[in-house]
Image (cartoon, rainbow, N blue to C red):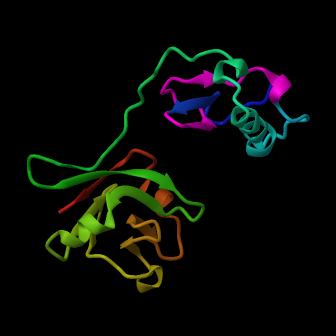
């Protein structure tokens, strides 16, 4: 039985369409009957080996329950969202650290540009004045709107995560 990074696989019967995707806990059908899978199942290509064969059979009219058992329980996971603190400071969180040690936050660049400039970004025990346009603008800490459209914290020529000693879910304050 293959292992999935996100848990089980689910089927969603959505009006005229049936969707197939990794199970995220929202309730559906666990695809557990391996006779419908392509063999051998690759550990990295479930779209080809599991999802495509199941989708093909769904298109022929098979019921989603033919592929496995109904998933009855749902587990809700907390989701961090930027929020305005009582003192008016915007509080966001680090969602991802890339391979360079850049900190990608949940704070939208679109929202940041609406704030009075220049902003001050507080992360770890450091303050960053204003937004940079590129990574090359500073050899020190900088804040910029990255290619994903969200606030990023970077360290010119270094690893911001290690320098600041922060990680996923650490707070970022913007004033």
Nearest the camera: 33 or 146?
A: 33
Tell me residue 75's x, y (percent): 45, 22
* The N terminus, quarter of image: top right
Rendered residue at 61%/30% (across/down) = 11
| Residue 169 locus on image (x, y percent) | 40, 44
Instruction: State the image quarter where residue 66 is shown.
Output: top right
Q: Is residue 54 above or below residue 162?
A: above
Q: Is residue 94 left or right of residue 87?
A: right
- Compared across the picture, whether 35 is left or right of 89 comes to right
Q: Nearer the viewer, residue 155 or 83?
A: 83
Looking at this view, name the residue that lies furthest to the right.
40
Q: Residue at x 57, y 65 (%)?
A: 100
Residue shown at the point (44%, 59%) measured from the top left: 104
Q: Is residue 35 magenta?
A: yes
Q: Residue at x 50, y 57 (%)?
A: 162
Residue that protrudes farthest toward the bottom in the picture: 137
Name above or below for residue 2 compared with residue 117.
above
Residue 102 is left or right of residue 49, and the answer is left
Quarter of the picture holding the C terminus: bottom left
Looking at the picture, how far across and down is residue 41, in whole percent? Answer: 85, 36
Q: Which residues are magenta?
A: 15-36
Decide if residue 87 is on the left or right side of residue 43. left
Q: Position of residue 139 (x, y in %)?
A: 45, 81
Q: Nearer the viewer, residue 11 or 118?
A: 11
Q: Is 51 included in the stretch rendered in magenta? A: no
């Amino acid at each position: 039985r293959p292992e999935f990074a996100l848990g089980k696989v689910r089927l969603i019967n959505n009006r005229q369409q049936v969707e197939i995707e990794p199970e995220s806990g929202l309730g559906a059908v666990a695809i557990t009957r391996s006779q419908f899978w392509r063999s051998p199942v690759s550990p990295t290509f479930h779209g080809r080996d599991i999802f495509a064969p199941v989708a093909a059979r769904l298109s022929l009219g098979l019921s989603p329950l033919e592929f496995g058992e109904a998933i009855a329980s749902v587990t809700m996971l907390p989701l961090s969202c930027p929020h305005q603190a009582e003192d008016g400071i915007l509080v966001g969180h680090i969602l991802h650290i890339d391979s360079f040690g850049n900190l990608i936050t949940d704070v939208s660049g679109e929202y940041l540009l609406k704030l009075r400039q220049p902003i001050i970004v507080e992360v770890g025990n450091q303050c960053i004045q204003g937004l940079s346009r590129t990574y090359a603008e500073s050899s020190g800490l900088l804040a910029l709107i990255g290619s994903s459209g969200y606030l990023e914290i970077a360290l010119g020529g270094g690893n911001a995560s290690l320098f600041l000693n922060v990680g996923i879910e650490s707070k970022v304050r913007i004033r």
